[in-house]
Amino acid sequence: MIQTIKIRNFALIENAEIPFERGLNILSGETGAGKSIVLEAISLLLGGRANSETIRSGADEAVVEGYFDIEQLPWLKVRLQEIGIECDGNELLIKRTVSKSGKNRIFLNGQLATLNMLSTVCEDLIDLCGQHEHQSLFKSVVQIALLDRFSGIEDLQKKASTQYRKTVTLLEEWESLKKKEEERVQRLAFLQFQLEELEAAALVPGEDESLATEKRLLQSVGQRMSLASQVHDALDGEEGALNALRIALSKVKSLCQMDEGVESLQSSIERALAEVEDAAHASRAYTSRADLSPHRLEQVQERLSLITNLKRKYGNLLDEIIAYQAKLREEIDLLTHLSTRLDSLENEYGEERKLALKLAKDLFEKRKKGAEGLSKAVSKELKELRMQDAEVGFSLVFSDDLASWGGESLGTGAELLVRTNLGEEKKPIQKIVSGGELSRLMLAIRRVIADKGGIGVYLFDEIDAGLGGQTAFTVGKKLKSVAGYNQVLCITHVPQVACFADHHLSISKQSSKGRTVTEVRCLSDAERRDEIARMLGSEKLTPAALKNAKDLIESARA
């Protein structure tokens, strides 16, 4: 229930704190006093559009706060938790600020929130039944929602809706893959061409660097052979180092026979001779090992040319090309098995569609049964609201074409039918009822579903417009009945309705310091009697007028 609404610098309201109570809360006042301003403020709390034009002249921002007791609304606590809003107790605080700078803000229990979060939280928090909302009853989706609530089948509806969305998701995935089939074939052919080209190349990591080195060696083979031959000649030629060392060794041996002190010199020459012999052998081996084949150079150059072309296509580095080749295999495997995925999706969709249809048909049957009960109950209420010949019914049809379901209808097509005059056929509601009749029909429906729970507050905005006398009194009695299960706020001009109030608020327009302001006051019993007398049309509060007001209030209490 709404405990309090605080309004600051909103339209004509400078500063107001409006307390509400359980039961039937009546808001009354002269036309133009500002009742619609209170309604706009409540609409803003529920996620309505913020408009800087609603800021009171001379102020920089407007602020509207709503304090709600949500002890009896456990679903709302769950909803708050789901969107990350803390809710330790049984209170919900909604605050909205509207700034001229355009920096509007929303707070839920003190936490900054988005408009989408606010709309999510406030869904079903307040059921607004106003002159403009009557038209919503013409919509099939609204009629179906009323049926589901009356029948107590919201859980089945949610289950069927979840299954429907799952089925549609599978269908959309299948259709998306199907549309890409031609593109898939072209893409697969292109990828296979690339893979074949790379596999034919049989690239080896680091191959380009080793080939480049080999190419340099092959290109310098003649020069290398000449140098190696010169080295060999210098070491083992007629005038080479070996001959010189052999002569030196012969001489030093003779010297050792004369002087043992030069044995170390002999050892050095012997070592030098051994090393030079090894070097001469290595140079001779090098010249015999050199590849003089021009065909090998041609092969290396062709291989390097191939690698260069592949780098231009697939990557600057050989490792990148090899990694790309692995990715090609993965994508080709995925695309190759896409047809298998399509078949799997088609089979899965078929099974899920069967389940969706079963749940939707079960829901339809329960809606049909609920429609009978709701029609009887609403028809009875209408008779009590002075529409003795009125009867309500539903035309329900089922479609197994999932594409036509949409929204939450889940295959059920609903049309609310009404007969207001005896002997006439029931016809669609929008073709039959007048504004006053539509108001009573809305009230009758709310009266029937009032004890079904799920709604925090009912707000009726001049639902009694165009009514008077005994019919208006009956409307007041019905509102009082609805208030037995839910908190009810009712904006009214009709005294026969206002007399049923548990809590009466008066909205008036005053002048203060050269400015017009709207004030909201809680009325005492005496003030309430005076307000009812005014609403009865008395220009002056004469004893007779006050007695009439008192009698009306007592009649409502009887």
Image: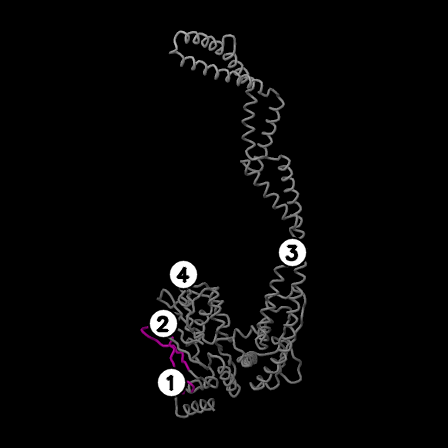
Identify the magenta region. Answer: 504-532
Please tell me whether mark 2 or mark 3 is closer to you in this view: 3
- Sequence-wise, which precedes: disc 4 or disc 3? 4
Callout 1: few (<14), some (14-19), or many (20+) C-alpha neighbours within 10 Å? few
Cβ atoms under marks 4 and 3 closer than 8 Å: no
Q: What residue type is labelled 2?
A: Glu
Callout 2: few (<14), some (14-19), or many (20+) C-alpha neighbours within 10 Å? some
**Nearer-the-camera pick, 467 or 224:** 224
Please tell me whether mark 4 or mark 3 is closer to you in this view: 3
Mark 4 and mark 3: Cα distance apart in space? 43 Å
Q: Name the residue under label 4.
A: 103
- Sequence-wise, which precedes: disc 1 or disc 3? 3
Q: Which amino acid does label 4 sit on?
A: Lys
- Sequence-wise, which precedes: disc 1 or disc 2? 2
Q: What residue type is labelled 1?
A: Ser
Q: What element carries label 1?
A: loop
